[in-house]
Amino acid sequence: MALSTERLGLYNPEKPMENRITDLGPRHFWQYFPPIIRNNYGKWTHHEILEPGILVHFSETGDKVFTVRCGGCRFMTVEHVREICDIADKYCEGHMRFTTRNNIEFLVDSSDKLEALKKDLMSRKHVSGSYKFPIGGTGAGLTNIVHTQGYIHCHTPATDASSMVKAVMDDLFDYFQGMTLPAQVRVSMACCLNMCGAVHCSDIALLGYHRKPPIVDAEVLESVCEIPLVIAACPTGAISPAKTESGKKAVKIKEERCMFCGNCYTMCMALPLSDKEGDGVTILAGGKISNRISPPKFSKVVVPFLPNNFPRYPEVCETVKQIIEAYASDAKKYERVGDWAERIGWEKFFEKTNIPFTEHLIDDYRLQYDTYRTSTQFKYTEAAWEVSRAAGGIED
Ligand code: HEM
Ligand code: HEM
Ligand code: HEM
Ligand code: SF4
Ligand code: SF4
């Protein structure tokens, strides 16, 4: 009803509330189900992954539905969406769906249609050579990277989202098209520590990070910001009220207390902090959301800083690969990255991934005590010996 074209052109800026339609909510999903999904809703008995990217679900009615999953770039043009629609029209009676990781799924009801669809999808490329619809993302492999806006649209980022995701996915493309890992690996990305998305709960996470305190634009601050909000925004209490020489209300920031979170800038545009050399990427590992075997886990910081080396981020790609390769060769079947790291001990994680441990990784925020080792259980590693030597401990 609401989306009917009959209503187009009725908007009158003189009377904005006239003909206004509101609070309709989303369309009901039932409208968009392929008939085979509608007929077998709630009746599925089991499923199989036929090959990377291809699933088949069986119903108690005897029906079968094949799903082809392909990578999507998430940030896409209407032209690209129209191409998705053309494919859906050609093979799937106009139906398709997007997944929670922004992959694209096409559903068909016979293996003949499946083969034709697969061939068509893999033949479509951008003029520059990239696959438009690479098939994969199922099972114990690597699927799409959940990511954010970056320099394309947000004003608080410390790095870019789309370009980093493209660089990392290019590097790990074989894992997207394969199912050769001990368990599925979720990589996610956020361009500042607002962490829009899933970085705090992913196997591997890429996070935009600042290293310099905000600049206080005291001339305009009082006219554009609610000062109490600014003060309350700071997690470390680094901000206090101040006055300029000319008597304007402003704030001052105790720089040694600031950890560059950028929260005060979110509240107050007179406190910008992005910086070409300062900003970069932090890498976290070991998070998960599912309750399978072990409970959900937060990801932990394992690399404090890598440079924003646009446009291909070689250091970030290299580190992600180091983690995935060490995990792939060492973890047991069904173990997620976090399960593996906890079983072998984080000191061994650093040794096996060849990532240096630095003081930045030691928690110093409020509940930090629980993250220290209150035990004599640990394994000797070269890195541990180095810390011991640096602290004047025993010689090996
Ligand atoms: C009555 C007005 C609006 C309603 C009810 C509405 C509702 C929503 C909802 C429910 C979501 C999904 C949130 C989620 O994923 O959890 C969303 C996402 C979003 N909205 Fe709105 N919105 C409105 C207006 C706007 C306006 C005016 C803008 C931009 C100027 C906007 C930009 C966005 C963007 C960029 C997203 C994120 C899409 C994504 O990446 O998933 N929205 N909105
Ligand atoms: C009713 C008004 C609007 C709605 C509901 C709306 C909603 C959205 C949504 C949902 C997206 C996709 C975001 C994503 O998937 O990542 C988007 C993208 C975008 N919108 Fe709007 N928008 C509105 C008005 C505007 C206005 C007024 C501007 C600029 C002044 C704008 C600028 C953009 C830009 C640049 C993008 C692409 C960048 C990106 O995806 O991050 N939009 N919008
Ligand atoms: C696609 C549309 C847009 C997206 C996805 C988007 C995204 C965001 C995000 C993520 C924030 C931070 C919110 C928070 O941390 O609480 C924000 C805040 C803000 N955005 Fe946008 N934005 C969109 C459109 C616009 C447009 C069109 C304008 C102005 C023309 C605008 C002006 C602002 C301002 C002034 C704030 C700060 C408000 C505050 O004090 O929290 N945004 N936006
Ligand atoms: S993570 Fe931060 S910078 Fe990125 S889109 Fe979200 S708020 Fe913006
Ligand atoms: S950037 Fe974060 S820590 Fe620094 S002053 Fe602003 S709110 Fe406080």
Image: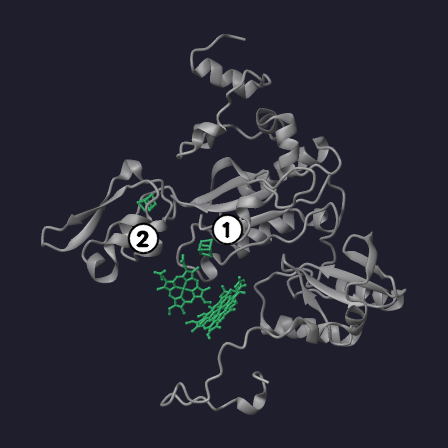
Horizontal relation, residue 332 to residue 25: left or right: right
Relative vertical location of residue 217 with respect to residue 258 in this rendering, above or below: below
Q: Earlier in the sequence, mark 1 or mark 2?
A: 1
Pick the residue in front: 270 or 132: 270
Residue at the spot x=87%, y=62% of the render?
60
Queried on whether the Cβ of the residue with tag 2 lies below 8 angstroms from ligand 5, the answer reads no
Residue at the spot x=58%, y=70% of the render?
77
Rendering coords of residue 119 (x, y %): 81, 64
Q: CA distance from mark 1 to mark 2?
A: 19 Å
Task: Say which mark, if any, is on residue 157.
Answer: none
What is the total number of numbered labels drawn onto the structure image? 2
Asked which secondary structure carries label 1, the reply is: strand
Relative vertical location of residue 263 with respect to residue 352 in this rendering, above or below: below
The image quadrant where one finds the C terminus is top right
Q: From where the camera sits, is residue 232 visible? A: yes
Rendering coords of residue 186 (x, y %): 63, 47
**CB-based contact (under 8 Å), mark 1 and mark 2:** no
Pick the residue in front: 87 or 13: 13
Asked which secondary structure carries label 2, the reply is: loop
Relative vertical location of residue 152 with respect to residue 212 in this rendering, above or below: below
Queried on whether the Cβ of the residue with tag 1 lies below 8 angstroms from ligand 4, the answer reads yes
Q: Which residue is mark 1?
A: 190
Q: Residues within 10 Å of mark 1 (few under 14, many from 20)?
A: many
Q: Residues within 10 Å of mark 2 (few under 14, many from 20)?
A: some
Q: Which residue is mark 2?
A: 272
Q: From where the camera sits, is residue 312 visible? A: no
Pick the residue in front: 130 or 152: 152
Q: What's the residue type where badge 1 is placed?
A: Ala
Residue lying at the far top of the rendered structure: 395
Residue at the spot x=21%, y=49% of the render?
251
